[in-house]
Amino acid sequence: MAGWTKIASVASLPEGRGIRIEAGSHRIAVFRVEDAVHAVADRCSHAEASLAEGDLFDEEIECPRHGAAFDLRTGRPLSLPATQPVPVYQTKTEGGELYVLLDDREES
Ligand code: FES
């Protein structure tokens, strides 16, 4: 599965928290922040916790396991113990639907 892929309706996305969406082999943590939608791999770069289950602060997600924060726009870690970024997916919305740009990498 590669290319732009419809994964959800924008209206179905919760506000103020993340949601995990699986698309092929990709496990994606999706966050709706006001008018923006961010999507990152749903696997913390430190020890593989689900970022979709973390606490959302504006455009930062805090890992639920050890508390590392990541910038949802870039995937960069903002605090320890994580030192590596998480992959970021490009997103677009059309007709009320959310699309992510998938590549051929294996995520899960
Ligand atoms: S698993 Fe996310 S900070 Fe450790």
Image: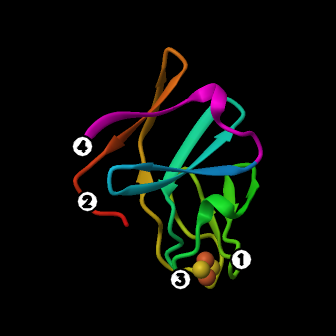
The residue that appears at 47% across and 65% down in the rendered structure is 86
State yes or no: Cβ of the residue under disc 3 lies below 8 Å from any atom of ligand 1: yes
Q: Residue 72 or 44: which is nearer the viewer?
A: 44
Identify the residue position indicated by label 1 in the image: 67
Instruction: Please identify, in this view, whether the residue under mark 1 or under mark 4 is nearer the observer.
Output: 4
Dividing the image into four equal quarters, which quarter contains ligand 1?
bottom right
**34 relative to 27, above or below:** above
In the rendered image, residue 40, in percent from the top left (x then y), is placed at 49, 55
On residue 105, the disc is 2
Identify the residue position indicated by label 4 in the image: 2
Q: Residue furthest top?
A: 95
**Of label 1 and label 3, which has the lower sequence position?**
3
In the rendered image, residue 93, in percent from the top left (x then y), is placed at 49, 25
Q: CA distance from mark 2 to mark 3?
A: 19 Å
On residue 47, the disc is 3
| Residue 14 lies within the magenta run | yes
Amino acid type at mark 2:
Arg
- 100 sits to left or right of 53: left
Amino acid type at mark 1:
Gly
Q: CA distance from mark 1 to mark 4?
A: 32 Å
Amino acid type at mark 4:
Ala
**Of label 1 and label 4, which has the lower sequence position?**
4
Instruction: Please identify, in this view, whether the residue under mark 1 or under mark 3 is nearer the observer.
Output: 3
State yes or no: Cβ of the residue under disc 1 lies below 8 Å from any atom of ligand 1: yes
Give the magenta range.
1-16
